[in-house]
Image: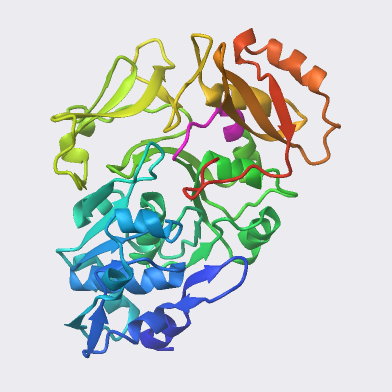
Amino acid sequence: MTSADQASERVLYQPAAGGESLSYGQILCDFDGGEHPYFPVVRPPDTPALLRALIPALVLGKPLTLFDGDFSEEACRQLGGTPDLFAASEPCLFPVLADLNTFLAALRAANGFTLTLFTSGSTGLPKRVTHTRQTLLRTVRTGSSHSADVWALAFNPTHMAGVQVILQALLNGNPLVDVFRAPQAVIARALERCGITHISATPSFFRLLLPLETPVRGVRSVTLGGEASDGGLHARLRAAFPGARLRNLYASTEAGTVLRAEGEGFVIPAALRDRVRIEGHHLLLHRSLLATFSGGSVEAGEWYDTGDRVEFIDGAGSVFRIVARERPWINVGGDKVDPAEVEAALCAHPAVAAARVYGKANSVLGNLLAAEIVRADGGAAFDELALRRDLAARLQPYKIPRFFAVVPQLSLGRTGKRA
């Protein structure tokens, strides 16, 4: 079999729940030395459309702006996205890439590519953030040791985390198995059927996925990012994926991936000690690590306060964990409550599989805590009184939710995190 035949048969994209698949050979058909349209601004309706826009921009070294398909028409309009803009293209001469090795070499060598994305907009209209090829590929690993990887795409593909998974797979000629927003049973089947070896996802994704009926030994790498996680979830992941290396990432749309940890505790590596620091339990990044914002330079000047709070978990003050990610602390009568802490306590109860804690406005206390919970499969019937007694042994009284609602599944927002 020739290398061209191998490219034709190798899967680039496969949806776990069924739908259009895409091979590397189909992509290579466009790289024939002819003139083809290039679209600099896209709002892809699905992941295959995103890949068909992203790959030419990478190879040609052109800028690309990705609008999220979940944006409303009004949000697109406010951000400058109009139907005319999405339809605008320019003719470009595509190089000849006759086989997979030539294609991968072109992806890795091209310069000039930039990618503009949008922040989640949890505190208002999303910000426009532009990354260079260098910031995007800072943590991508390539080489023969990655040639057999099979990646689960568990993030929104038009967000930073999703793009980084796509680039990691793409630059190694790996398959992508799309499990984003797929039902738990579909994802569980895909782990074995598609031979998935690497999963990078939010803690919310994993809490919805677990427990699995049987451990999956083919998965070699499990990475968490985007939210605070906890030791209990890590233990469940090690049991579900006994052959996997467990990693924790600190990343953001503004900076990409910055820190890696084996478990819950982060350490600032020597190479980043002059560009990452902690002040007043806040994580700060030097502007050299950041992308370019639509309004010019980052408002913080030399140092950018991520808004993420940390706490040290060792006596020397060098190992820390993220205690609040992208969600504000809830003010309950003057006491600040970290939702992640309460969620971890809820999930420690054997009857609870997953939980979401949020504030309900109250005219006296400012907020009252409320929680949605998903019962553990095969667990005992929900007993609120027993749950409250268990929480009382773990939490201060003001951290115990006043209201509980049992739901079949926690809702995920457009970022793949809990809504």
Residue at x 42%, y 14% (from the top left corner): 314
| Residue 313, quarter of the rendered image | top left
Q: Which residues are magenta?
A: 226-234
Does residue 150 appear left or right of residue 159 in this picture? right
Residue at x 61%, y 29% (from the top left corner): 232
Q: Is residue 274 above or below residue 255?
A: above
Q: Position of residue 366 (x, y in %)?
A: 52, 16
Determine if residue 137 is in view: no
Q: Position of residue 370 (x, y in %)?
A: 64, 25
Task: Compare residues 162 and 127 and report the one nearer the observer.
Answer: 127
Residue at x 47%, y 22% (from the top left corner): 329
- Which corner quadrant holds the C terminus? top right
Q: Position of residue 25 (x, y in %)?
A: 40, 83
- Which corner quadrant holds the N terminus? bottom left
Does residue 247 appear left or right of residue 411 in this picture? left
Question: Is residue 233 inside the magenta stretch?
Answer: yes
